[in-house]
Amino acid sequence: MASDSDPDADGPEPTADRDAKADVETDRAIADEEALRRIADRTPTRLGVGRTGPRPTTDSLLAFRADHAVARDAVRSRVDDELLADLDLVALRTNVADADQYLARPDLGRELDAASRERLLEECDPEPEVQLVVSDGLSSTAVEANIPELLPILRDGLAERGISVGTPVFVEFGRVDVMDAIGEELGADCCVILIGERPGLGSAESLSAYLVYGPERGTATSRKSVVSNVHDGGLPPVEAGAELVDLIEETLAAEASGIDLREDDREFRES
C-alpha cells in the first residue's frame, strides 16, 4: 500500500493543486479575448465580467444593480395614460388592487372587475373575428416600448386580409388568462393578448403575444399559441406583427390554436 506521502498514490489532488489547475484552465478559456467579445456582443447574458479577488469588478456590480432597478421599475410602474389614449384603447382593470397583490394573487388577474366587465360590454363590438387585448402583465415598460409600433401593424395587416377586428382594450394588472374571459364575454372567434413578460436583467422590454381560438374561461395553456421575446433586441415589433397576422389567419382557417393547430404537435400529444 502506498504511504500518505507517496506522490503516485491514488486519491484526490491537494486543494492547492486543483485550484492551480482550475486557474490555468480558466486562463485558457478566456485567452482569446476577441472571441469572447464576439460571443458577448451576441447576447445580453453577462459573460466574461471578471473579478477582483472573490468579488465582481465595480463596473460589473454597478451594471448589475442598475439592470435590477430597471427590472423592478418595469413591474411596479404603470403604463402612461396618454399612450392608451393615443392608441384608442378602452381601459379596463382586473380584480387586482395593486402591484403587491398582483404578484401574490395571479388568480385575481384572470378576471375583470365588475365595472370593467360592464364597460367591456357597453363599449366594445360584439362577436368580432379577432379581439385584441393589451396588458401590462409583468412589464409596463414592454408595453410602452413595443405596442405603439406593433398594434397598428397588427390592425392594418388583419384589415388588409379582410379579418374583422373588435374594439382593442387595455387591461391593467392582467394575466394571460384574462383573454379567455374577455373573448368569452364578447363572443370572439379568436382572442389575442399582447402582454409584458417577466423582466430579466438583460431586458425589461420583452413582450409576448398569446392567441386562442374559441376563447372561454378555463382554456388550457396548451391550446394557446404564443409568439414571445418581442422587442428590439429579440423579435422586432415589425416582424412580430407580420408573423402574428399570418398566425391569426392560419388559426381562423383551421379553427384551432396551440397544439390543436400543429399536426406534428398533435401527433406528439397522442403518442
Image: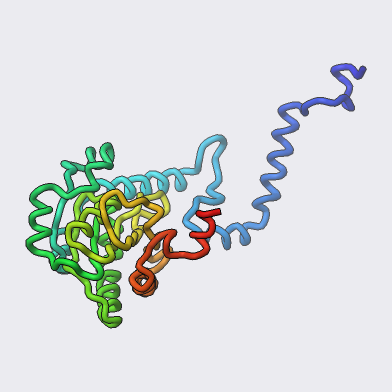
Q: Position of residue 150 (x, y in %)?
A: 30, 70
Quadrant in the picture for residue 182 = bottom left
Color style of the picture: rainbow
Residue found at the very far right of the displayed protein: 1
- Residue at 19% over, 52% down: 172
- Residue at 92% over, 17% down: 1
Closest to the observer, 58 or 220 = 220
Q: Is residue 95 left or right of residue 251?
A: left
Report if residue 74 is visible in the image. Answer: no
Closest to the observer, 211 or 173 = 211
Q: Position of residue 62 (x, y in %)?
A: 41, 45
Q: Position of residue 33 (x, y in %)?
A: 62, 57
Quadrant in the picture for residue 163 = bottom left
Q: Position of residue 58 (x, y in %)?
A: 46, 43
Report if residue 126 is visible in the image. Answer: yes
Residue found at the very far front of the displayed protein: 270
Closest to the observer, 86 or 35 = 86
In the rendered view, would you say 43 is above or below 239?
Answer: above
In the rendered view, would you say 139 is above or below 99?
Answer: below
Q: Is residue 92 left or right of residue 77?
A: left
Q: How many marks?
A: 0
- Residue at 37% over, 52% down: 221
Quadrant in the picture for residue 209 = bottom left
Closest to the observer, 271 or 80 = 271
- Residue at 10% over, 48% down: 114
